[in-house]
Image (cartoon, rainbow, N blue to C red):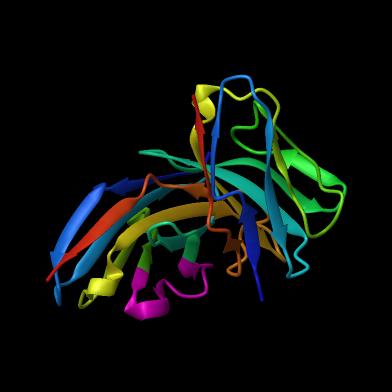
Amino acid sequence: NAGVTQTPKFQVLKTGQSMTLQCAQDMNHEYMSWYRQDPGMGLRLIHYSVGAGITDQGEVPNGYNVSRSTTEDFPLRLLSAAPSQTSVYFCASSSAGANDEKLFFGSGTQLSVL
Amino acid sequence: AQSVTQLGSHVSVSEGALVLLRCNYSSSVPPYLFWYVQYPNQGLQLLLKYTSAATLVKGINGFEAEFKKSETSFHLTKPSAHMSDAAEYFCAVSEGGANNLFFGTGTRLTVIP
């Protein structure tokens, strides 16, 4: 059982470049979310989805786009990367939202924007 | 508005000593409270969750936390630290039906042999 898979694990971008962080889960979870983790700030919610075709903004959505065309995948897009987006990004999924005790996290993507 | 404050960004204990990691929360409604652990280069794993069923919550790996409404606290404890407990610990709060967890800034636990 793969759980929540994030790719790539590491990425370096130049300012203005675009890229997509991939997140896939094989547990048939309806809820998926993206967090960013910055030193001294804990994790903050970027976007979340409660099912295919449904997405909504979290605390820090600016500069990021998401879509949910399938239950399994929830990609995070940076259209024009900025140094302020240097962070570690975590994807999480569950069958019953953020409160679910079975909220599974991926192992993270470390992104550096130069 | 919900928020969590974790006192102490770094805590060091000797192996076998008591572990106490502090968390205070702010919530306008009865909250859900969580403790997560993060080992190096890994995602977060749930240690325990409070949902109002009992004020003392037992989690995995010998950890427990006590909900104290009068103090708005949810401190994490373990009677005897083990080397494998070295990690970063996050307290989080959420309101029922919400789709977001609000995390504290984390406490890095070091266990000294």
The residue closer to the viewer here, B69 or A48, is: A48
In the figure, is residue B71 to the left or right of A20? left
The residue closer to the viewer here, A49 or B52, is: A49
Q: Position of residue A98 (x, y in %)?
A: 63, 56
* Residue at screen point 50% across, 23% down: A83
Q: Which residues are magenta?
A: B46-65
In the figure, is residue A12 to the left or right of B13? right
Q: Where, quadrant-wise, is the C terminus of chain B in this rendering?
A: bottom left
* Residue at screen point 68% across, 53% down: A23
* Residue at screen point 47% across, 53% down: B92
Residue B94 at least partly seen: yes
* Residue positioned most to the top: A16
Q: Position of residue A11 (x, y in %)?
A: 55, 40
Q: Is residue A76 magenta?
A: no
Residue B99 at least partly seen: no
Q: Quadrant of residue A17?
A: top right
Q: Please tell me whether residue A75 is drawn above or below residue A70 in the rendered image.
A: above
Q: Position of residue A4 (x, y in %)?
A: 64, 62
